[in-house]
Amino acid sequence: MSRQTEFINKIVPRAIVSMKKHGVLASITIAQAVLKSGWGRSSLASKYHNLFGIKAIGNWQGKAVNMKTGEYRNGSHVTEKYFF
């Protein structure tokens, strides 16, 4: 079984639960997780289980990790540190 198939099989159950609760197709959620996490291989995904690159901003009270990330500002790619 390929790494990609394993990744999809791992996240399908939660994507289906989310679809039933929020109405977003599971296929869309899975595709976004693949795109943002590099098939679950990014550090943010593999170490911290954050598949979507969601940042901890505002009044977030839970656990967070400070990591560098690539962002686009005014059409230019820059590296910035954020709490995730």
Image (cartoon, grey):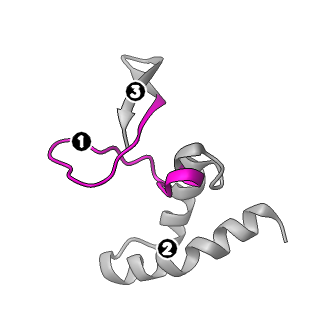
Name the quadrant containing residue 9.
Answer: bottom right
Point out the stretch of residues depicted in magenta.
45-69
| Structural crowding at the residue carrying mark 2, measured as other residues with C-alpha within 10 Å and reported as few (<14), some (14–19) or many (≥20) | some
Residue 16: image location, x then y, percent = 47, 81
Residue 21: image location, x then y, percent = 32, 81
Asked if 42 appears above or below 82 in the picture, the reply is below
Residue placed at 37% from the left, 84% from the top?
20
Answer with mark 3 or mark 2, whichever residue precedes in sequence: 2
Which sits in the foreground, 1 or 28? 1
Residue 68 belongs to the span the image colors magenta: yes
Residue 69: image location, x then y, percent = 48, 31
Where is mark 1, residue-wise?
57
Q: Is residue 21 left or right of residue 61?
A: right
Where is mark 3, residue-wise?
81
Q: Residue furthest right?
A: 1
Asked if 10 appears above or below 31 in the picture, the reply is below
Answer with mark 1 or mark 2, whichever residue precedes in sequence: 2
> Mark 1 and mark 2: span between their CA atoms?
26 Å
> Mark 3 and mark 1: span between their CA atoms?
12 Å
Residue 65 belongs to the span the image colors magenta: yes
Where is mark 2, residue-wise?
26
* Numbered disc total: 3
Mark drawn on residue 31: none
Disc 3 residue type?
A: Lys
Q: What main secondary structure does the magenta stretch of the protein show?
A: loop
Q: Residue furthest left?
A: 59
Residue placed at 45% from the left, 73% from the top?
25
Residue 3: image location, x then y, percent = 77, 62
Answer with mark 3 or mark 1, whichever residue precedes in sequence: 1
> Mark 3 and mark 2: span between their CA atoms?
30 Å
